[in-house]
Structures are given as structure tokens and as C-alpha cells.
Image (cartoon, rainbow, N blue to C red):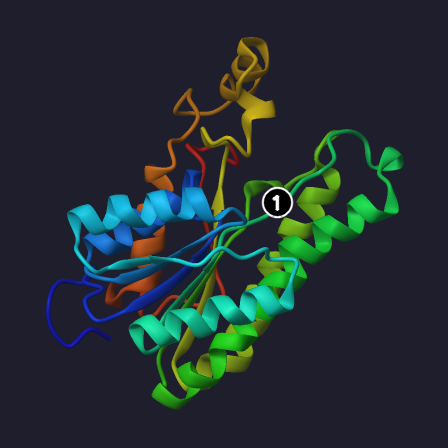
Amino acid sequence: MAAEGTLFDLTGKVAVITGSSRGIGKAIAERMAQHGAKVTISSRKAGPCEEVAAEINAKHPGSAIAVPANISSKEDLQRLVDETRKAFGKVDIVVCNAASNPYYGPMAGIEDDQFRKILENNVIANHWLISMCIPEMKERKDGSVIIVSSIGGLRGSPVIGAYNVSKAADFQLARNLAHEYGQYGIRVNCIAPGLVKTDFAKALWSNPETLRRATEPVPLRRIGEPDEIAGAAVYLASAAGSFMTGQALVVDGGATI
């Protein structure tokens, strides 16, 4: 619980956000910094991370650092956590946003290594990063873990089936960890975005016909913007979401209803 400030105040909090050099991760980092948090920007390439950190620091001096990391490397993730602690002293908020989907097509055609990569990056890497940050959260009896899943984890698909399997696993990872760590005041939740205008989802929105098919059945008749997911993350990280744990917060323009 935040002692002072508004329900959404993140002053004094430190957030590690993977996949935050662009798209949803970047939007989350920008909004968390705006609400007072210190943020660590991370994705595979150093350049884009440094650019985003510089942009955030221009608006909120001293509130962002860049630590490139490949989520498939346990060593990289440990360095990400270590560098954050070195710069900001602790980790209060973990946002597992980075994910991969190297395959587009029916599940019968997926290669074993592609399937493994999806499960390793989208589920196991999340488990690693969260596990690295949990001990200090347990000590403080406070912490918020946010996994960016997808509405894909709630339904089938003829083209992103394995990705959807991994995202369904993320829901269960959150439920399990919420169960294990709730006694220490640590909350673990998922955000399940619908189709959002990011480079990652480009295959699903760049073609006008595909976009029309994707948005026609959606009540809001459009796809989302990254910033429209960021508010959900601020909510889950702040005092506003202090009684919320083990949940999947669906932000999809109504697609799943």
C-alpha cells in the first residue's frame, strides 16, 4: 500500500520491464516513470534501450537506466536484476513483457526447436526473472509481478497456436505464484491484451484485409494502442491494485466477449 500520494502513485518504486525498447513494454515504462517509478529498460539490443531510457530521463531526470538482456539467457536476466539493484537499490515491480513467436501457421507444421523457443521465452524465462526478484520482495513483504500474456491464451487459433499455449501457461504461472507468495504481500497478475498496434503483432494488422477481419467482430471496431495497455500495468503495480492477485486483466476492446 502506498503511504502517501494518489492510488496510482509509484514514487519510490523500482520497476524492471523486459521488452521495453518498443511497443507495450515501452509504453508501460513511460507511464510508470510518469507516475514516479524508477525504470529499467531492457531488450536484446543496447541502442534502442538507451534511446528509450534517454527519452524518459529527458522528461523525468534520473528515472531510467538501460540494461540490454536476452530473456533466453539466465545470466543476462541475473545481470538485469543486479544492474537494477546497483543503480536503484532494489526491485519492487517486475514486468515480464518480452515474448517471442517464431512461427506462424498450424501446429502440425511447427518445428520442435520453434515450439521450445516459444515455451522457454514466454513461460520459463518469466519464471526465472520473477524468481530472481522474489527473495527481496518477501523480505519487504511487498511486490508486484505483472506478466503480459494475451487473449490468445483464452482461445484457439489456426496460426498462432503454440504462442497461445504459452500465453495460457502464463495465466497459470500467475495463479500459482500468487498462491505461493500472497502470504508475503506479493501480488502476481497477468494483463491479456487483444490485438495492439506493435511491431510484434505486425503480421496481424499490417494487411488491411487481415485488419478488417480482426476488427469487424470487436465491439470497439479497432485495434489497441500500446499506451492503452500501460494504464493496466500502472493499476496492477500501484496501491490501486493492492487487493488484486492471480488474475488475468483482459484489455481487448471487447474482442473476447
Residue 250 in view here: no
Residue 165 in view here: yes
Please tell me which residue is depicted at 58% across the width and 9% down the height of the picture: 209
Frontmost residue, 190 versus 14: 14
Frontmost residue, 122 versus 70: 70
Q: Position of residue 89 (x, y in %)?
A: 32, 78
The quadrant where residue 82 appears: bottom left
Q: Position of residue 69 (x, y in %)?
A: 54, 57
Instruction: Tell me the residue that label 1 is attached to.
Output: 154
Residue 221 is left or right of residue 170, and the answer is left
Mark 1 surroundings within 10 Å by alpha-carbon count, few (fewer than 14), some (14 through 19), many (20 or more): some
Please tell me which residue is depicted at 37% across the width and 48% down the height of the picture: 50
Q: Amino acid at mark 1?
A: Leu
Residue 8 drawn above or below residue 90: above
Q: Position of residue 100 (x, y in %)?
A: 63, 44
Residue 18 drawn above or below residue 5: above
The quadrant where residue 222 appears: top left
Please tell me which residue is depicted at 18% across the width and 62% down the height of the picture: 9
> If the image is split into quadrants, where does the N terminus sit?
bottom left
Q: Position of residue 19 (x, y in %)?
A: 49, 49
**Which residue occupies the extreme left position in the image?**
5
Residue 6 is left or right of residue 210, and the answer is left
**Which residue occupies the extreme bottom position in the image?**
139
